[in-house]
Image (spheres, rainbow, N blue to C red):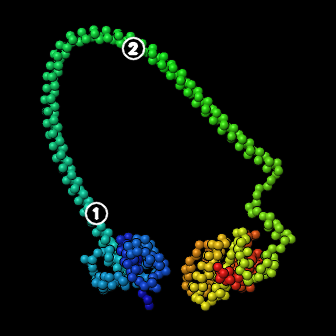
Amino acid sequence: MTAPQEELTAPLPQQVRQRVVGWAAAALGALPADEVPSTLKAVARFAPAKRARSGASQLTAALDSDPLFRHRVAAWTRADQPDLARALEAGENLPAADPVVVAALAYLLRPPGWPARVMHAADEAATADRVAAQDRHGAQVAHLTEQLSKARAENVAALERARAEIQTLAEAAEQSRRQIRKAEAEMARLRASVSQAVAAAEKAQQQALEDRAATTNQTRRLRARLDDAQAALEAARRASREERNSDEVRLRLLLDTVIQAAQGLRRELALPPLPHQLTLPADAVADGQAVTPAAVGVSDLAVRALQADDPALLDQLLALPQVHLVVDGYNVTKSGYGTLSLAEQRNRLVNGLASLARRTRAEVTCVFDGTTLDVRVIQSSPRGVRVLFSPEGQSADELIRRLVRAEPDGRPVVVVSSDREVADGVLAAGARAVPASLLLRRLDRA
């Protein structure tokens, strides 16, 4: 009877998960390509330093859900940490080892009782973190105490300096008082001189008042002339603005008149709004008694103009406005160069179609059958050519018919295929069908 599988009863601690992801990222780079899980193909292409950082979520999911991948990572870790892995699998106590490393290694190797060892190691790591935090807190308290003592000493020194400065200021104040008394005596001597000077100043002031009155009158006259000039300038500016506004009003009135006249004419004629898809005159003629290529078939058109295998016939079709050329890829390549490998056939046809698209400016879509492919094919699409592979469960013929049905009525669509069933299907949908030999001759001529 198989022993019950042991599981963690709580989420894997963050530090342990980071260490496990780091080992998984390193082991992923050493795995052969065929052993890399499909969900980690993109992560395996990352640089080693980027793998654990950008692919952490994918690596974690693969470790949790893919036992084979976890076993391969465990084998790589056992080779990287042989002594620790051996002691862990033997059930020995590892007091000297890093508890985070022990927990991560127990999660990967999964010896008996590994969930308890993971949680025990995680608890030891958490306890170590708390002790370290307490040590850091004690160091901070000691540092702050030292800073407080230093600040107190600096305050005492600043107080002593302030007392010395106060004494110096008191001495300076006494000296200033002596200088003030000396200045007062000097001021008394000067008062007499000031009285004489005041008399002279009053006389000069009277003369200045007379001169000021004359200057004021002259300034008043000049200000009146300046006011007149400013008023004239403002009037000229106002007239210019009014003229410009009048021109703008006349232009806006003319534009509104034209718009309202057009709207009134439309209401008077009761013109309906334009439909979303217009029926062009040429479509109306085609729906009448005129014979269209879709009605008579390409062979009839060739009889009236060109031979059915003449490449000029394809040039005429590709000259139609907004034409869409849809190519049955393998039907054409196997008719023209079936001795080549499928990859060489695709490259040769797609490159030829790219050259044809550049010359004709037609929309070109090349469809290959993807149901027989064992592996995913990466096919480059040159500019101007849309390359499609039919999805699983659908043939290229069905995809071609879907492309034709997706086009709006009236748009010219040309399908290149020698398959009679494909030709009949696209003709029923309104497209033109031409044989593969016509396109091959056109590409050979180019």
Above/below status of 216 relative to 318: above
Quadrant placement of the N terminus:
bottom left
Spot occupied by residue 106 in the image (x, y as percentages of width and height):
35, 80
Picture quarter containing residue 351?
Answer: bottom right
Q: Residues within 10 Å of mark 1 (few under 14, many from 20)?
A: few
Which residue sits furthest right?
289
Above/below status of 20 relative to 193: below
First in sequence: mark 2 or mark 1?
A: 1
Describe residue 110's horizontal placement relative to residue 148 as left or right.
Answer: right
Q: Name the residue under label 2.
A: 212
Describe residue 42's horizontal placement relative to residue 242 as left or right.
Answer: left
Residue type at mark 1 is Ala
Picture quarter containing residue 357?
Answer: bottom right
Q: Residue at x 43, y 73 (%)?
A: 55
Real-space Cα separation, disc 2 to disc 1, in angstroms: 84 Å
**Viewer-proximal residue among 133 and 319:** 319
Describe residue 362's horizontal placement relative to residue 378 as left or right.
Answer: right
| Residue 227 makes an appearance in the image | yes
2 vs 1, front mark = 2
Picture quarter containing residue 161?
Answer: top left
Spot occupied by residue 428 in the image (x, y as percentages of width and height):
77, 78
Q: Mark 1 points at which residue?
A: 133
Spot occupied by residue 257 in the image (x, y as percentages of width and height):
74, 42
SS at mark 2 in the image: helix
| Residue 390 makes an appearance in the image | no
Spot occupied by residue 136 in the image (x, y as percentages of width and height):
26, 61
SS at mark 1 in the image: helix
Residue type at mark 2 is Arg
